[in-house]
Amino acid sequence: MKTNEMEARILVVDDEDKIRTFLYHFLSDEGFKVKVADSGTKAVNMADSFKPDIILMDQNMPGMNGIETLEMIKSRDPLVVIIIITAYGAVPLAVNAIKKGAYDYIEKPFDNSKLLLLLHRAIDHKKLSSKVMVLQDRLDKKYSFDNIIANSDEMQKVLEQVKRVCETDATVLIQGESGVGKELIAQAIHYNSPRKEMPLVAVNCGAIPVQLLESEFFGHEKGAFTDAKETKTGKFEQAHKGTLFLDEIGELPLEAQVKLLRVLEDKKINRIGDKKAIPVDVRIISATNKNLTQKVQEDKFRLDLLYRLNIFTITIPPLRERKDDIPLLTDHFIQKYNALLKLKIKNITRPAMDLLTQYNWPGNIRDLENAIQSSMILCRDNIITEDNLPIRVYGYSEAESDFETGKESLEDQINQVNSKVEKEIIIRALRKCNNNRTKTANLLKISRKTLFNKIKTYKLFDGNIQSKS
C-alpha cells in the first residue's frame, strides 16, 4: 500500500543489472525515491549526495565488498539503515555484517512482501533513531557546561573541578546548602561522562520511609513480603552501567548505611527474597547539605561509608558568597518564566537589582528563582521594579531570623516575626516615598511621631535608609 510515509529514500547497491533494475521499478512503484549503484565505490559517493534513509546492498561485489562499503558509509552517516542482500546459505556472513552495523539481512531470491515488511520496519527504526539523536542532542546541550549560569570566580573553580572529575569514573560527594544547585552539578557530571548514554537514577535518601529503603535500593522478588505482588527492580539495577545519584545522603539511617557500604565494596546486590547476587556497575554521586564529619562525631554517620563517598569532594558555595552570579541568574530566570508564563518582562531596574545583590538569599538559587517568578507576576510595566520584589528582600540581612524550636517561646518567636515584618514594611514605604517621613507616615496611616519612634527602634538612620523631613 502506497502512503506518504513511504517517500523514504532508498539506495540499491548490487553488481547484477537485473536485480538493480527490478528493485528500482518495484520500489519506485511502491512510492519510494530510489537510486541505484553497481559498486561499493559508487555507493559511497552516491550516499554523500543522495542522503538515503535505507541502503539495500549486496554482500558480495567485486572491488569493495558489502562489509567494506558498510563500514565506510556508516563512518560518514551513523543513522543510515543498511540491509544486506545475501545469497542462500551465506547467512553467517550476513550475521557478521549485522555485528558491523547493518540493521538486518534478506536472502536471495527474496519474497516481495517480506522485503516490504522489512523496509517498513527499517523506516520505523530510522525514525526512532533520529528522535533519540535529537533528544540526546537536547540533553547534551541542556547539561553542557555553557548552560550552567556562573560568572563568579568561586563557581568557575567549581566548574573546573566538575570538568576534571566527569572524565573519570570516580565517586563524587557534592556538598552545599539547600538550593545551591547540587543536583544540577550531578547531572552535568553524568551527562558529560563516558556513562552519559546510560541511565542517571536519582534517589532522595530523606524521602524514602525507613521500612522501604532496602526494597527501593535493591528491589525485591514477588512474594518476598506481604505487599510484594510482583518482582521489583531496585535503583542500583536501574542505574547499571550508569550513575546513581544519592541526594541528601546525610539523612540515610545507620542500618541502611551498612547495606550501602557492602554494595559499594562488593559491587553486588541481593533483591529481597532472592539469595542470588546480582553484579552491578554503578557510579555513585552523592550530595548533602549536612556536615558529614560532624554527623560521624555524633555517631549518626559511618566513617567507613564517608571514606567511600568522598573520594572526590565538590563544595558549592552559597549564593551570598558569589553575588556576581545574581545578575546572570536573574536574566536567566526572566527568560525562563517569560516562556513558561507567557509574559513579556524586558528587564529589571538598577535599584531592584541592587536589592537582589544585597540580600543574602538563605534559600540560595531556588530562593532567588522563586522571588523572580513572583516579581514577574506582579510586574505591570514589563520592567521589574523594587515594588515588585518580595518584602523580605528589603532591608538588611540581619532581618533574617532562624528560630530553633525550644530555644524561645512561641510568643517570643511571634513577636520577632511581627517586628521583622513591620520593619520591612516601613523600609519599603520609606523607599517608595523617597525616605520622606511625612509622606511615609501618611502612606502608612500613622502619626509622624510614631513613625519616627519606629525608625529609631529599628535603627533605620544608618545604612541604606536615611530619614528625611
Image (cartoon, helix red, strand yellow):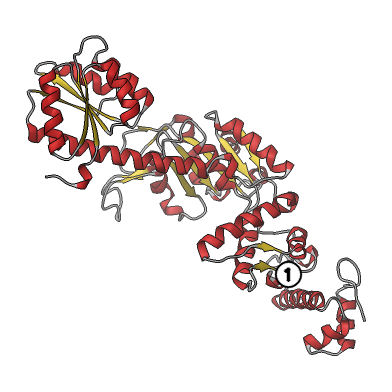
Residue type beneath disc 1: Glu
Q: Horizontal and vertical percent for residue 100?
A: 29, 21
Q: Horizontal and vertical percent for residue 268?
A: 40, 32
Mark 1 neighbour class, 10 Å CA radius: few under 14, some 14 to 19, many 20 or more: many
Residue furthest right in the image: 469
What residue is pinned by disc 1? Answer: 386
Q: Horizontal and vertical percent for residue 14?
A: 18, 19
Q: Quadrant of the C terminus?
A: bottom right
Left or right, 172 with respect to 155, comes to: left
Residue 133 falls in image quadrant: top left
Front residue of this view, candidates 230 and 369: 369
- Report helix, strand or loop for mark 1: helix
Asked if residue 387 is positioned above or below residue 283 in the image, the reply reads below
Q: Can residue 348 be seen in the rendering of this structure?
A: yes
Front residue of this view, candidates 220 and 235: 235
Residue in view at x 26 percent, y 17 percent: 40
Residue in view at x 55 percent, y 47 percent: 183
Q: Can residue 257 be seen in the rendering of this structure?
A: no
Residue in view at x 31 percent, y 26 percent: 47
Asked if residue 202 is positioned above or below residue 125 in the image, the reply reads below
Q: Horizontal and vertical percent for residue 430?
A: 82, 77
Q: Quadrant of the N terminus?
A: top left
Front residue of this view, candidates 9 and 81: 9
Asked if residue 339 is positioned above or below residue 71 in the image, the reply reads below
Left or right, 57 with respect to 322, comes to: left
